[in-house]
Image (cartoon, helix red, strand yellow):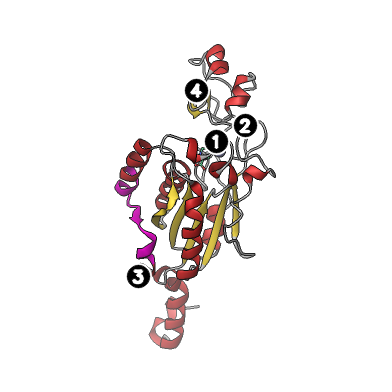
Amino acid sequence: ALDIDKSGDVDIDELRESYHTWFGAALKPVRALIIIDVQNDFIDGTLSLKHCPAGQDGARVVPVINQMRKDVNFDCVAVSLDWHPHRHCSFQESCAEGDFLAPLHPSQSEEEARNAALFDSVVFVAPDGKTEMKQTLWPRHCVQNTWGAECHKDLIKLDDDIIVHKGTNSRIDSYSCVYDNGKYQQTTMLEELRSRGVTHVYLCGLALDVCVTFSALHLAEEGFVTTVVLDACAGVSDEGIAEKLALMAKCGVQLVHSKELPAIV
Ligand code: VGL
Ligand code: ZN
């Protein structure tokens, strides 16, 4: 290591080496592909995007993502999985049974919560015991170790891929693969990316206006140079997509087409 007190007789080779150790990681881009929730339930299962307002086919992203893995030399690949317990606060079925996995907020009547329809929202209390937490109710989906939680059968996965589970806490939902919706807890994503010196992240997957957007915003906030590959994503609703694309652009997230990547990277 460089001893500042002896700067009179600095060894230039040692200096160069130290410089490389200190700053090399920051200067040399380390790129991660992050594949968000390309799971059966969002494609052909209980929360199929085909039956959502935008009517998109989630399976369309699979060949695009596979092609990106071939065309671009990513330093690592992370695969996130929505990974809920059978009972979860985001499930309309749980609410309808009066099985509230988080306390209802005083402004939320139990009657209304029980009768809430799919895609309605209910107001819970956040894990801090006081903050209002608005939760959209989805059909039961991506239950741990079920077919619906498996990735699409054609999605390429390699042994070295990083797997990150999200939404495992029944009390709070987690759209982002980084933090839950109230930022109370984090997944393993940041430690996985930081331990590999990742500087740049490229996101794709499902759903563009939900989990891809929330993940991209958290990663941008954490200092990663963040890009979303739009044709490698499918979304829930056209209005949601328009709103979230504007939000991401405003927050410095780059929006690109997969064809542009080999030239950029
Ligand atoms: C998602 C709704 C509920 C997603 C997950 O992966 O976009 N959407 N849970
Ligand atoms: Zn979910």
Quarter of image, ligand 2: top right
For the residues bearing labels 3 and 2, Cβ distance under 8 angstroms: no
**Mark-to-mark CA distance, 2 and 1:** 8 Å
Give the vertical position of 168 relative to 1 (above or below).
above
For the residues bearing labels 2 and 1, Cβ distance under 8 angstroms: yes
- Image mark for residue 88: 2
**Mark-to-mark CA distance, 3 and 2:** 43 Å
Q: Residue at x 40, y 81 (%)?
A: 7
Q: Nearer the viewer, mark 2 or mark 4?
A: 2
Instruction: Determine the secondary structure under disc 2.
Output: loop
Callout 3 crowding tier (Cα within 10 Å): few <14, some 14–19, many ≥20: few
Q: Residue at x 37, y 41 (%)?
A: 241
**Mark-to-mark CA distance, 2 and 4:** 14 Å
Q: Which residue is mark 1?
A: 173
**Mark-to-mark CA distance, 4 and 3:** 46 Å
Q: What's the residue type where badge 3 is placed?
A: Ala
Q: Is mark 1 within 8 Å of ligand 2?
A: yes
Q: Which residue is mark 3?
A: 263
Give the vertical position of 225 relative to 37 (above or below).
below
Q: Which residues are magenta?
A: 247-261
Mark positioned earlier in the residue sequence (3 or 1):
1
Mark positioned earlier in the residue sequence (3 or 2):
2
Q: Is mark 2 within 8 Å of ligand 2?
A: yes
